[in-house]
Amino acid sequence: MLEIKNLYSGYKGTDVIRNITLQAGRGEVLCIVGPNGCGKTTLLKSIAHIIPYRGTVTLDSREVSSFSRKNLAKKIALLGQISELYFPYSIYDTVALGRYAHSRGFLRGLSKEDDELITDIIKKLELYDEKDRMINELSGGQLQRVFLARTLVQDPDLILLDEPTNHLDLKHQVELLRYLASWAKENNKTVIGVLHDLNLVHHFGDTAAVMGGGKLIALGKPEAVLDGETLRETYGIDIRKFMLESLENWKTTGVRKTEDGKTDG
Protein backbone atom coordinates (compact mmCIF):
# COMPACT_ATOMS: atom_id res chain seq x y z
CA MET A 1 0.00 0.00 0.00
CA LEU A 2 2.69 2.50 1.09
CA GLU A 3 6.13 2.29 -0.47
CA ILE A 4 9.03 4.61 0.30
CA LYS A 5 12.28 4.51 -1.67
CA ASN A 6 15.49 6.48 -1.14
CA LEU A 7 13.72 9.23 0.81
CA TYR A 8 15.57 12.40 1.81
CA SER A 9 13.92 15.29 3.62
CA GLY A 10 14.60 18.05 6.10
CA TYR A 11 14.42 21.77 6.70
CA LYS A 12 16.09 24.86 5.21
CA GLY A 13 18.20 22.82 2.83
CA THR A 14 19.52 20.41 5.46
CA ASP A 15 18.51 16.75 5.31
CA VAL A 16 17.23 15.32 8.58
CA ILE A 17 16.40 11.90 7.15
CA ARG A 18 18.56 10.21 4.54
CA ASN A 19 18.01 7.31 2.16
CA ILE A 20 14.98 5.81 3.93
CA THR A 21 13.42 2.81 2.20
CA LEU A 22 10.49 0.88 3.68
CA GLN A 23 6.97 -0.26 2.97
CA ALA A 24 3.77 -1.00 4.87
CA GLY A 25 0.78 -3.06 3.77
CA ARG A 26 -2.94 -2.92 4.42
CA GLY A 27 -3.99 -4.16 7.84
CA GLU A 28 -0.49 -3.52 9.18
CA VAL A 29 0.60 -1.56 12.25
CA LEU A 30 4.13 -0.24 11.75
CA CYS A 31 5.81 1.26 14.82
CA ILE A 32 8.72 3.68 14.45
CA VAL A 33 11.16 3.94 17.35
CA GLY A 34 14.39 5.80 17.98
CA PRO A 35 15.96 8.51 20.15
CA ASN A 36 14.81 12.12 20.08
CA GLY A 37 15.99 14.05 17.06
CA CYS A 38 16.57 11.01 14.85
CA GLY A 39 14.01 12.09 12.23
CA LYS A 40 10.84 10.19 13.16
CA THR A 41 8.53 13.21 12.95
CA THR A 42 10.23 14.41 9.76
CA LEU A 43 9.54 11.01 8.19
CA LEU A 44 5.83 11.25 9.01
CA LYS A 45 5.60 14.81 7.64
CA SER A 46 7.30 13.68 4.44
CA ILE A 47 4.88 10.78 3.97
CA ALA A 48 1.96 13.20 4.44
CA HIS A 49 3.65 15.65 2.02
CA ILE A 50 3.57 18.41 4.61
CA ILE A 51 7.21 19.11 3.81
CA PRO A 52 8.99 18.53 0.46
CA TYR A 53 11.09 15.44 -0.08
CA ARG A 54 13.41 13.78 -2.57
CA GLY A 55 12.92 10.16 -3.54
CA THR A 56 9.57 8.44 -3.89
CA VAL A 57 6.58 8.05 -1.54
CA THR A 58 3.77 6.15 -3.23
CA LEU A 59 0.33 5.24 -1.94
CA ASP A 60 -1.29 2.45 -3.94
CA SER A 61 1.40 3.03 -6.59
CA ARG A 62 0.65 6.77 -6.90
CA GLU A 63 3.13 9.45 -5.78
CA VAL A 64 1.65 11.35 -2.82
CA SER A 65 2.96 14.66 -4.20
CA SER A 66 0.60 14.24 -7.18
CA PHE A 67 -2.56 14.37 -5.02
CA SER A 68 -4.44 17.59 -4.38
CA ARG A 69 -4.51 18.54 -0.70
CA LYS A 70 -8.18 17.58 -0.37
CA ASN A 71 -7.78 14.23 -2.12
CA LEU A 72 -4.66 13.47 -0.10
CA ALA A 73 -6.67 14.15 3.07
CA LYS A 74 -9.01 11.35 2.02
CA LYS A 75 -6.03 9.01 1.84
CA ILE A 76 -3.70 10.09 4.68
CA ALA A 77 -4.35 11.56 8.13
CA LEU A 78 -1.60 12.80 10.44
CA LEU A 79 -2.08 13.26 14.18
CA GLY A 80 0.89 15.30 15.40
CA GLN A 81 2.36 15.68 18.86
CA ILE A 82 0.88 19.11 19.50
CA SER A 83 -2.53 20.34 18.36
CA GLU A 84 -3.18 24.02 19.02
CA LEU A 85 -6.60 25.29 20.05
CA TYR A 86 -7.87 28.17 17.98
CA PHE A 87 -11.59 28.05 18.70
CA PRO A 88 -13.52 26.58 21.66
CA TYR A 89 -15.54 24.08 19.64
CA SER A 90 -17.49 21.29 21.30
CA ILE A 91 -16.10 17.77 21.26
CA TYR A 92 -18.66 16.73 18.64
CA ASP A 93 -17.99 19.72 16.37
CA THR A 94 -14.23 19.24 16.64
CA VAL A 95 -14.48 15.58 15.66
CA ALA A 96 -16.88 16.48 12.84
CA LEU A 97 -14.13 18.58 11.21
CA GLY A 98 -12.56 15.29 10.17
CA ARG A 99 -15.33 14.87 7.60
CA TYR A 100 -14.38 18.07 5.75
CA ALA A 101 -12.40 16.30 3.02
CA HIS A 102 -15.44 14.16 2.22
CA SER A 103 -17.97 17.01 2.14
CA ARG A 104 -18.97 19.50 -0.54
CA GLY A 105 -18.80 22.29 2.02
CA PHE A 106 -19.87 22.59 5.63
CA LEU A 107 -22.70 24.97 4.72
CA ARG A 108 -24.48 21.87 3.42
CA GLY A 109 -24.25 20.25 6.85
CA LEU A 110 -23.42 16.69 7.83
CA SER A 111 -25.15 13.73 6.25
CA LYS A 112 -26.85 11.00 8.27
CA GLU A 113 -23.91 8.71 7.47
CA ASP A 114 -21.46 11.35 8.72
CA ASP A 115 -23.35 11.68 12.01
CA GLU A 116 -23.48 7.91 12.49
CA LEU A 117 -19.73 7.59 11.90
CA ILE A 118 -18.89 10.47 14.26
CA THR A 119 -21.19 9.14 16.97
CA ASP A 120 -19.81 5.61 16.70
CA ILE A 121 -16.19 6.72 17.05
CA ILE A 122 -16.71 9.14 19.95
CA LYS A 123 -18.57 6.38 21.77
CA LYS A 124 -15.69 3.95 21.24
CA LEU A 125 -13.23 6.54 22.55
CA GLU A 126 -15.42 7.19 25.63
CA LEU A 127 -16.26 10.76 24.65
CA TYR A 128 -19.97 10.53 23.91
CA ASP A 129 -21.28 11.51 27.35
CA GLU A 130 -19.33 14.79 27.08
CA LYS A 131 -19.82 15.42 23.36
CA ASP A 132 -21.25 18.91 23.96
CA ARG A 133 -18.41 20.02 26.23
CA MET A 134 -16.00 22.68 24.94
CA ILE A 135 -12.56 21.32 24.13
CA ASN A 136 -10.77 24.19 25.92
CA GLU A 137 -12.14 22.70 29.16
CA LEU A 138 -10.55 19.28 28.63
CA SER A 139 -7.49 17.64 30.13
CA GLY A 140 -4.54 16.77 27.91
CA GLY A 141 -5.58 13.11 27.80
CA GLN A 142 -9.17 13.90 26.86
CA LEU A 143 -8.01 16.34 24.20
CA GLN A 144 -5.70 13.71 22.72
CA ARG A 145 -8.64 11.34 22.34
CA VAL A 146 -10.73 14.08 20.70
CA PHE A 147 -8.05 14.74 18.09
CA LEU A 148 -7.64 11.01 17.51
CA ALA A 149 -11.41 10.73 16.97
CA ARG A 150 -11.21 13.57 14.44
CA THR A 151 -8.45 11.65 12.65
CA LEU A 152 -10.48 8.42 12.57
CA VAL A 153 -13.65 10.02 11.18
CA GLN A 154 -11.52 11.29 8.31
CA ASP A 155 -11.59 7.60 7.32
CA PRO A 156 -8.21 7.60 5.55
CA ASP A 157 -6.40 4.58 4.16
CA LEU A 158 -3.29 5.49 6.13
CA ILE A 159 -3.09 7.03 9.61
CA LEU A 160 0.19 8.56 10.77
CA LEU A 161 0.49 9.02 14.53
CA ASP A 162 3.28 10.95 16.24
CA GLU A 163 3.41 9.70 19.83
CA PRO A 164 -0.35 8.97 19.99
CA THR A 165 -0.21 7.91 23.65
CA ASN A 166 1.15 11.30 24.73
CA HIS A 167 -0.84 12.63 27.74
CA LEU A 168 -2.76 9.36 28.12
CA ASP A 169 -2.80 7.27 31.27
CA LEU A 170 -1.83 3.59 31.05
CA LYS A 171 -5.41 2.34 30.67
CA HIS A 172 -6.15 4.66 27.76
CA GLN A 173 -2.76 3.97 26.14
CA VAL A 174 -3.54 0.26 25.96
CA GLU A 175 -7.16 0.78 24.89
CA LEU A 176 -6.13 3.29 22.23
CA LEU A 177 -3.51 1.04 20.63
CA ARG A 178 -5.79 -1.99 20.87
CA TYR A 179 -8.51 -0.04 19.07
CA LEU A 180 -6.11 1.19 16.36
CA ALA A 181 -4.77 -2.32 15.74
CA SER A 182 -8.32 -3.67 15.41
CA TRP A 183 -9.36 -0.72 13.22
CA ALA A 184 -6.47 -1.37 10.82
CA LYS A 185 -7.16 -5.07 10.44
CA GLU A 186 -10.96 -4.91 10.32
CA ASN A 187 -10.99 -2.07 7.77
CA ASN A 188 -7.94 -3.11 5.74
CA LYS A 189 -6.17 0.15 6.64
CA THR A 190 -2.59 0.97 7.62
CA VAL A 191 -1.33 2.61 10.81
CA ILE A 192 2.17 4.02 11.22
CA GLY A 193 2.93 5.32 14.69
CA VAL A 194 5.91 6.81 16.48
CA LEU A 195 6.17 5.26 19.94
CA HIS A 196 8.70 5.52 22.75
CA ASP A 197 7.43 2.65 24.90
CA LEU A 198 9.07 -0.48 23.48
CA ASN A 199 6.73 -2.70 25.48
CA LEU A 200 3.79 -1.24 23.55
CA VAL A 201 5.67 -1.81 20.28
CA HIS A 202 6.16 -5.48 21.14
CA HIS A 203 2.52 -5.84 22.07
CA PHE A 204 0.79 -4.01 19.22
CA GLY A 205 3.25 -3.62 16.34
CA ASP A 206 3.24 -5.98 13.39
CA THR A 207 6.47 -4.36 12.21
CA ALA A 208 9.05 -2.16 13.92
CA ALA A 209 11.35 0.36 12.24
CA VAL A 210 14.35 1.49 14.28
CA MET A 211 15.77 4.90 13.34
CA GLY A 212 18.99 6.55 14.38
CA GLY A 213 20.85 9.59 13.09
CA GLY A 214 18.31 10.18 10.34
CA LYS A 215 18.71 6.69 8.90
CA LEU A 216 16.80 3.43 9.06
CA ILE A 217 18.79 1.08 11.29
CA ALA A 218 16.54 -1.98 11.28
CA LEU A 219 13.13 -3.05 9.95
CA GLY A 220 11.21 -6.23 10.71
CA LYS A 221 9.18 -8.05 13.33
CA PRO A 222 9.55 -6.39 16.75
CA GLU A 223 10.97 -9.54 18.33
CA ALA A 224 13.60 -9.73 15.60
CA VAL A 225 14.80 -6.12 15.36
CA LEU A 226 14.41 -4.87 18.94
CA ASP A 227 17.38 -6.90 20.11
CA GLY A 228 19.80 -5.81 22.79
CA GLU A 229 22.72 -4.88 20.53
CA THR A 230 20.63 -2.80 18.08
CA LEU A 231 18.96 -0.88 20.90
CA ARG A 232 22.25 -0.33 22.72
CA GLU A 233 23.86 1.10 19.59
CA THR A 234 20.81 3.24 18.78
CA TYR A 235 20.01 4.61 22.23
CA GLY A 236 23.43 4.41 23.88
CA ILE A 237 22.03 2.36 26.77
CA ASP A 238 21.47 -1.33 27.44
CA ILE A 239 17.69 -1.20 27.26
CA ARG A 240 17.24 -4.97 27.28
CA LYS A 241 19.15 -5.24 30.56
CA PHE A 242 17.10 -2.42 32.05
CA MET A 243 13.84 -4.08 30.95
CA LEU A 244 14.86 -7.42 32.46
CA GLU A 245 15.79 -5.73 35.75
CA SER A 246 12.40 -4.00 35.74
CA LEU A 247 10.70 -7.35 35.13
CA GLU A 248 12.44 -8.83 38.15
CA ASN A 249 11.11 -5.95 40.25
CA TRP A 250 7.59 -6.68 39.00
CA LYS A 251 8.00 -10.35 39.88
CA THR A 252 8.77 -9.50 43.50
CA THR A 253 6.10 -6.82 43.85
CA GLY A 254 3.48 -7.93 46.35
CA VAL A 255 5.54 -10.90 47.55
CA ARG A 256 6.04 -10.96 51.34
CA LYS A 257 7.91 -13.24 53.69
CA THR A 258 5.90 -15.41 56.13
CA GLU A 259 7.07 -16.18 59.67
CA ASP A 260 8.70 -19.41 58.59
CA GLY A 261 10.73 -17.61 55.91
CA LYS A 262 8.61 -18.73 52.96
CA THR A 263 7.19 -16.30 50.46
CA ASP A 264 3.52 -15.55 50.06
CA GLY A 265 2.18 -13.40 47.21
Image: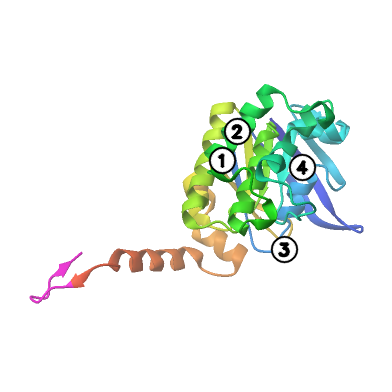
> Which amino acid, by three-letter code, is at mark 1?
Tyr
Report the magenta residues as a range.
257-265
> Which amino acid, by three-letter code, is at mark 2?
Thr
Identify the secondary structure beneath mark 1: helix
* Rendered image: mark on residue 47: 4
Q: Quadrant of residue 34?
A: bottom right
> Which amino acid, by three-letter code, is at mark 4?
Ile
Determine the CA span between mark 3 and mark 4: 17 Å
Determine the CA span between mark 1 and mark 3: 37 Å
First along the sequence among labels 3 and 4: 3
First along the sequence among labels 1 and 3: 3
Question: Quick check: is 139 in the magenta stretch?
Answer: no
Identify the secondary structure beneath mark 2: helix
First along the sequence among labels 2 and 1: 2
Number of marks in the rendered image: 4
Place of residue 37 in the rendered image (x, y in percent of width and height, measured from the top left)? 72, 63
First along the sequence among labels 2 and 3: 3
* Rendered image: mark on residue 128: 1
Question: Quick check: is 258 in the magenta stretch?
Answer: yes
Q: Which residue is mark 3?
A: 37
**Badges 1 and 3: C-beta atoms under 8 Å apart?**
no
Q: Which residue is mark 2?
A: 119
Can residue 63 be seen from the camera position used here?
no
**Badges 2 and 4: C-beta atoms under 8 Å apart?**
no
Q: Quadrant of residue 107?
A: top right
Which one is in front, 231 or 115? 115
Residue depicted at x 82% and y 49%: 8
